[in-house]
Image: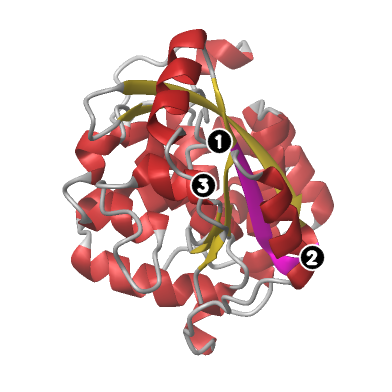
């Protein structure tokens, strides 16, 4: 059985073209990407050791080896951070030894007050599992009619993969699906991510599991929405990390004048207070 670290190294090796790293192209390759021998040589480790890492038989490579693999694969800063994170969780508690449980949904009073100050802006408090913990009334108005807030405990990740309306609401559904699947790796804890992952693997099928294990860092560009009113919206997302809480405050800002006007028209009649989801 592989590990997240081994899966990521193997996926990046398979997707890296030799010529990008200054190596000659291979002829008659059975699979694309780098040979194990080339990656091992560039990282200064043996082929046998690299094989053990990729197959999950070595779960504790040193920081020096992790950095050498990052250099050898030509990873960018975000990919390096992800590699280091996977090395940390792979060398720690094995997910199979934890008891999957849902993440807590508590919201600190000061965070609630911060959300109130953002009214009438579009803002939501979430975690990396996709739990929607609290939001402004304008966020509720924006997603009204999409089904996103219909559940007693709304979850963006579950909505994206199991509600057919999500594929219409998100213009670039595949990109959003990539984002929420990737974020599960940075969930509040292993046992919390395991709880949601087990549920989604059953109900969402290969659309979810393929993305979860691909380890492709999402682009996170402008968010494009098809509002139920028939209006197309383009929004920037400013994400404020609340590291101590394992939560994120996401503020949505119009990306162009037409979106600003459309949002103003959609939200003008609404002046409801902040809504918290318990």
Q: Earlier in the sequence, mark 1 or mark 2?
A: 1
**Element type where label 3 sits in the image:** loop
Q: Nearer the viewer, residue 234 or 18?
A: 234
What secondary structure prevails in the magenta region?
Answer: strand
Q: Earlier in the sequence, mark 3 or mark 1?
A: 1
Q: Quadrant of the N terminus?
A: bottom left
Q: Residues within 10 Å of mark 3 (few under 14, many from 20)?
A: few
Image position, residue 199 (x, y; %): 31, 73
Distance of label 2 from label 3 (alpha carbons): 21 Å
Question: Which mark identifies residue 110?
Answer: 2
Distance of label 3 from label 1 (alpha carbons): 63 Å
Image position, residue 8 (x, y; %): 52, 47
What residue is pinned by disc 1? Answer: 37
Q: Nearer the viewer, residue 271 or 93?
A: 271
Q: Earlier in the sequence, mark 2 or mark 3?
A: 2
Circles 3 and 1: CB atoms closer than 8 Å: no
Q: Which residues are magenta?
A: 244-251
**Is 242 on the left-hand or right-hand side of 213?**
right
**Element type where label 1 sits in the image:** helix
Q: Residue at x 51, y 9 (%)?
A: 257
Circles 1 and 2: CB atoms closer than 8 Å: no
**Is 232 on the left-hand or right-hand side of 131?**
left
Dividing the picture into quadrants, the one containing residue 110 is bottom right
């Amino acid at each position: 059985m592989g590990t997240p670290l081994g899966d990521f190294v193997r996926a990046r090796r398979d997707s890296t073209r030799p010529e990008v790293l200054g190596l000659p192209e291979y002829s008659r390759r059975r699979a694309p990407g780098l040979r194990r021998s080339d990656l091992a040589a560039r990282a200064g480790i043996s082929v046998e050791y690299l094989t053990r890492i990729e197959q999950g038989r070595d779960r504790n490579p040193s920081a020096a080896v992790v950095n050498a693999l990052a250099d050898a694969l030509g990873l960018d800063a975000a990919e390096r951070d992800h590699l280091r994170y996977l090395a940390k969780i792979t060398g720690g508690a094995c997910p199979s030894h934890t008891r999957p449980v849902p993440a807590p949904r508590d919201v600190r009073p000061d965070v609630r007050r911060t959300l109130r100050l953002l009214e009438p802006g579009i803002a939501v408090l979430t975690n990396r599992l996709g739990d929607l913990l609290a939001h402004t009334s304008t966020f509720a108005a924006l997603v009204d009619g999409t089904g996103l807030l219909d559940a007693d405990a709304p979850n963006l990740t579950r909505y994206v993969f199991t509600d057919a309306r999500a594929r219409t609401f998100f213009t670039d559904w595949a990109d959003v699906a990539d984002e929420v699947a990737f974020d599960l790796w940075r969930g509040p804890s292993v046992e919390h991510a395991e709880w949601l992952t087990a549920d989604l693997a059953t109900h969402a099928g290969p659309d979810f599991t393929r993305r979860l294990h691909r380890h492709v860092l999402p682009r996170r560009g402008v968010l494009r929405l098809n509002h139920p009113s028939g209006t197309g919206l383009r929004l920037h997302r400013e994400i404020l990390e609340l590291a101590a809480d394992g939560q994120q405050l996401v503020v949505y800002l119009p990306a162009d004048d037409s979106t600003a006007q459309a949002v103003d028209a959609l939200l003008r009649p609404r002046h409801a207070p902040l809504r918290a989801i318990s």
